[in-house]
Image: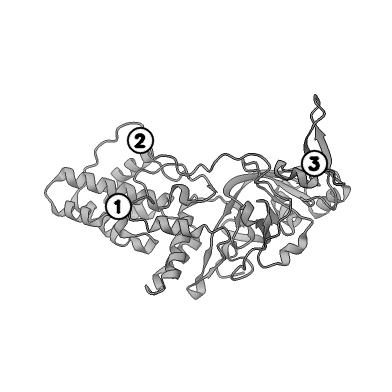
Amino acid sequence: MHKYSYLPLVLGLSAVAASAGAQTDAVGASQLQPVAPPQQTAPLQAPPVAPPTVQWNRAAAADLLAYVERIGEEGLDPADYAPERLREAIAGRSSDQLNSVATETFLRVSSDIALGHVRGDARMNWYINDTDLNGGEQYAMMQRAVRDNSIRDTLTALLPTHPQYNELKSVLADTPKSDKAKIEKIRTNMDRWRWLPRDLGKKYVIVNVPAYMVALVEDGRVVARRRAVAGAVKTATPQLDAKITGVIFNPWWEVPASISDEVRGKKGYVAVKDEATGKVIRYRQPPGPSNALGRLKMVMGNPHAIYLHDTNAKGLFDKQARAYSHGCIRTEDVLGFAELLLQPTGKWDHATIQQTVASGKTVKADLAEPVPVYITYFTAAAIADKKEIVSYKDIYSRDTPVLTALNDRAGKGGATLASASK
C-alpha cells in the first residue's frame, strides 16, 4: 500500500496514458436513450429574502484581504477578487463602501473555494451535484465570521478535504514559477476537486476516466481498485454521480437505438416488436458468453444510462489506453468487485456468486445499503512522497476550457453567490 492510500484513485496502473485507439464496440449506455443537454451551472439566484446588512469592521476586512492575497496557494488568481478595491475600502472613511466591497469579495471567494471557480460550459459533460453551499448559507456564514473574527478559518473550512487536493496544493507550492505547464495542470485539477462534494461518503466508488481506474474507498482507504475501459472519444463518458443499489448477474443487453442497424438480422439478438403493429422497436441480447455486458451489470440509475459492467472483450484491459466503449465503464474482475459491495448482505459469498453466474439465469442482488459512485475526470495526480505529479492524457480535450475559464479576466469563471447546481 502506498504511503497515501487514496493515491491509486487517480494514479491508475500506468504513469501516462497513451492516445486512445480508434476502434469502438457496441457496448455502452450514453446513447441508450436521449439525454437532455448538460445542465451546467444554473443562473445564480439571490437568497429568497433580503439578507440583513453585514457590518464589516476594518480588522475583519483586513483578514479577508490577507486571504485574497494568498489565494494563489489554492490555484486561484488573487486578481479575480479585486484586492485593490478592498484595500481602498479599508483605507477609506465610508462604512457603506467597506460593507459593500467586503461583502462582495467574501461572497465571491467563498463561492469559488467551495464550489469551484470554473462554471457553466467550461465543465464539459459534468453532471455531479454539489450542495456544499448556497446563497442563503453564505450570508449567515459571513455574519458569523465577521462577528467571531474568524474570516480565515471560515473560508478554509470550505476547501476540499480529500487528501489528493492538499497534495496537489503542496506540489504547486514547490513548483518553480517558470514551469507554467505544470502549474496550469495542477490548477486545473485542483479546481475539479472543488467541483465535488467535500464529503464523498464513508464508503464510495470513484472512477477516474483518464487513468482508466475504478476504486472502492471505505473510511478514507482504498480497499480495491480495478482497471477500466471508458468511453471512446466520440462517445465520451460523462462526469456524474449516482448510487449503486445492486447488481444483475447474467444481464440482458438492451441494444441502444443508435446502433440497432449493426445488430439487425444477426444471430443471438432478440427483436422486441410493438404488439399493435408488429414493427420491431428494439433489440435485446440474452445472457451468455457473447453478451456485450459480460456476466454482471451494476444497478446505478442515472439519466445517462451509464453503468459499470463486465465485458466479453477482456483483452482490452491489457492495453495502456482503454477508451473503447460507448460511454459505460467496463470493469476488470467486476465479479470480485461486486462481491466486496455485496459482502455486508451476508448472502453473497464467492461460491454463491459463482453458482449464480454458472446457472445462466438473470438474477438481481440488492446491496445492503446504496453506495455512492462518482465518475470523474482528473488529468493529474500528486505523488505525495516525491512532491511531484503524474499526468494522464486529456483524452476528451477537457483541460483547455477549464484553464481558459480559470484565467479569464472578463470574470466568466467564478460567481458571487453560490448555487447548489453544477
Residue corresponding to mark 2? 47
Picture residue at 15% right of the left edge, 45% below the top: 95
What is the secondary structure assignment of the residue under circle 1?
loop
- Residue 68 figure quarter: bottom left
Residue corresponding to mark 1? 150
Q: Residue furthest left?
A: 93
Which amino acid is tagged 1?
Ser
2 or 1: mark nearer the eye: 2
Which class describes the residues within 10 Å of circle 2: few (<14), some (14-19), or many (20+)? Answer: some
Q: CA distance from mark 3 to mark 1?
A: 60 Å
| Residue 252 relative to residue 416: left or right | right
Whether residues under marks 2 and 1 lie with C-beta atoms below 8 angstroms apart, the answer is no
On the image, the x and y values in percent for residue 287 come to 83, 46
3 or 2: mark nearer the eye: 3
Work out whether residue 123 or residue 162 is closer to the camera in this orientation and state it.
123
Which amino acid is tagged 2?
Pro
Residue corresponding to mark 3? 284
3 or 1: mark nearer the eye: 3
On the image, the x and y values in percent for residue 225 come to 66, 61
Q: Quadrant of the N terminus?
A: bottom right
